[in-house]
Amino acid sequence: MSATMKVAQVPSPGADIQIVERGIPEPGPGHVRIKVQACGVCHSDVLTKDGSWPGIQYPRVPGHEVAGVIDGAGAGVSGWKKGRALAWAGTAARIIRASRAGAEIFATARI
């Protein structure tokens, strides 16, 4: 049996959030996988739940503001190591990484 994770998903526009198990995906080339330890919810997640974003597919896992640790890296990733703490908000092009002092700074590298 492959490894699984629990996710909160919106099964369809306007539906209640469900907790379900899904397989843990392998990170693709140039990507890292984050083991999420905390996740924020913002207005766009509410719009996702309500079905107000045109063109998105369901079921959908909301939450694009996360903090956690890197637990996997795809081919071609350098400078991002397993176990490194980071926070991610919004886009794949920018990451916010947490320093050991607890401050947040924008990463200078694109993944």
Image: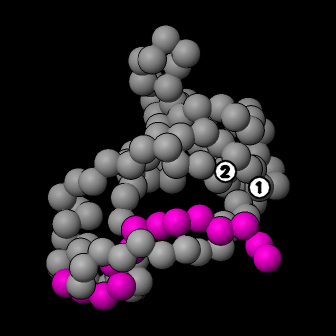
Q: Which residue is mark 1?
A: 74
Task: Return the x and y of residue 19 as percentages of the image width and height.
Answer: 41, 72
Task: Examine the structure image and report whether residue 4 is included in the region drawn in magenta.
Answer: yes
- Label placed on residue 32: 2
Q: Residue at x 42, y 44 (%)?
A: 38
Q: Residue at x 48, y 75 (%)?
A: 20
Task: Return the x and y of residue 99 as percentages of the image width and height.
Answer: 52, 19
Q: Is residue 67 left or right of residue 2?
A: left
Q: Quadrant of residue 100?
A: top right
User: Over which residues does the magenta segment extend?
Assistant: 1-14
| Callout 2 touching callout 1 (CB < 8 Å) | yes
Q: Is residue 17 above or below residue 100?
A: below
Say what amino acid the circle numbered 1 marks: Gly
Q: Quadrant of residue 24?
A: bottom right
Task: Examine the structure image and report whether residue 101 is included in the region drawn in magenta.
Answer: no
Mark 1: which secondary structure? loop
Q: Residue at x 74, y 38 (%)?
A: 82
- Count residues near mark 1 (Cα–Cα under 10 Å), then give few for <14, some for 14-19, many for 20+: some
Q: Residue at x 24, y 84 (%)?
A: 15
Residue 95 visible in the current orientation: no
Q: Is residue 29 above or below residue 14?
A: above
Task: Return the x and y of residue 42 as percentages of the image width and height.
Answer: 23, 54
Task: Return the x and y of residue 34 as percentages of the image width and height.
Answer: 60, 49
Q: Is residue 71 above or below residue 103?
A: below
Q: How is the image coloured?
A: one colour
Q: Is residue 16 above or below residue 31?
A: below
Distance of mark 2 from mark 1, alpha carbons? 6 Å
- Count residues near mark 2 (Cα–Cα under 10 Å), then give few for <14, some for 14-19, many for 20+: many
Quadrant in which the N terminus is drawn:
bottom right
Mark 2: which secondary structure? strand
